Structures are given as C-alpha cells and as structure tokens.
Amino acid sequence: MLEQDYLVKMIRRLVAGMCLAQRKRPKDPELAADMLEALMGDALDMDVHMLLGLAPESFASIVAVSQSDPRLADFVAHTLSLEARYLQDAGDLERAQLRSNQAQSLAAAFGIELASQAADEEDIISSCEACLGVDADSRDEA
C-alpha cells in the first residue's frame, strides 16, 4: 500500500510537470524539452543524459530491464514523443528524430500504443493520465 501511495504521488508530480512543460513550449520549446528530460530522469531514477544518448533499441532494453511498472514505461514513451515535438519546434531535428525513435522502440518493447504524430498534446497528456490513473483535477495538486 505504501509503495502504491508513493507511486501515485510520483505520477501526479510527473503529469503536473508535463503540463508545466506544455505551457512553456510556445515561448521556449528547448526549455520545455529539457523539463521533459528531467521528468524522465525522475521517473526512471537514472542518469537521463546517459540514457537518452543511447541508440533506440539499447534505450528500450535498459528501461525494460530496470523498469517493471508498465505505467511508468507508458509515461516515458509518451514523454519522449512530446519531447521530439518540442525539439522539432526548437529546430533540433537530429535530437528530435532520436527521441521519436526511442519512443517507438520503448513502445514496441512494452506493447504501448503511441498517439499518432497528428495527435494533440492534450490527448497525449490525457492518455498518460488515463494509463497512470490520474485525473485532470489532480494535475495541480503536485
């Protein structure tokens, strides 16, 4: 029970962080992308800079070995997908492509269905909330 309470609180912080990054995106998409990377580091409790520098298949393998909770893997896959969009907005196309490929590899490893590229950000955040069992009213409770 204690572990579940901790997980729920952490997930609420992560979703709130995603929403904050979403609000920063119009003015500074690179900052928003950096915020998402920090969230993933918190979620995975790993050195995110080292992890995100890996090839997509290696990234997915390490996360699969170290992360047993499929809800967090879903969060990370969707967050990578959002980060790819933010990096595209910032003009960092090479890193954007890497994040997109990492998201797809992680999704394949965990059987996660990623939203299409045309999907609205709010839909992606709602998908994460639904998967993680967080409702929109709890976003700001973190």
Image (spheres, helix red, strand yellow):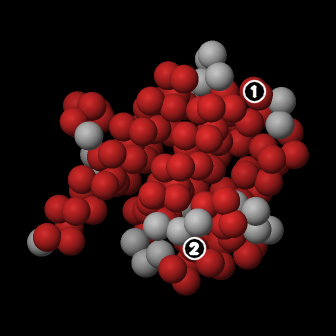
Q: Is residue 41 visible?
A: yes
Q: Residue at x 52, y 55 (%)?
A: 40
102 sits left or right of 3 in the view:
right
Residue at horizontal 40 percent and vertical 62 percent from the top: 71
The residue shown at (23%, 31%) is 137
In the picture provided, is 133 more to the left or to the right than 31? left
First-in-chain label (2 vs 1): 2
In this rendering, the answer to whether 127 lies above or below 55 is above
Q: Quadrant of the C terminus?
A: top left
Within 10 angstroms of label 1, few (less than 14), some, or many (20 or more) residues? some
**Residue 42 locus on image (x, y percent):** 45, 58
Which residue is at a point 55% across and 44% down the rendered structure image? Answer: 36
Q: Determine the CA span between mark 2 and mark 1.
A: 27 Å
Residue extending furthest toward the bottom = 65
Q: Which residue is mark 1?
A: 89
Residue closest to the eye, 105 or 86: 86
Helix, strand, or loop for circle 1?
A: helix
Q: Looking at the image, can residue 78 be seen?
A: no
Write down the residue under mark 2. Answer: 63
Picture quadrant of residue 101: bottom right
Where in the figure is residue 134, as x and y percent of width and height?
28, 45
Which residue ends up furthest to the right in the rendered image? 94
- Going by the image, does 1 lie left or right of 103? left
91 relative position to 89: left or right: right
Q: Above or below — where is 57 with respect to 99?
A: below
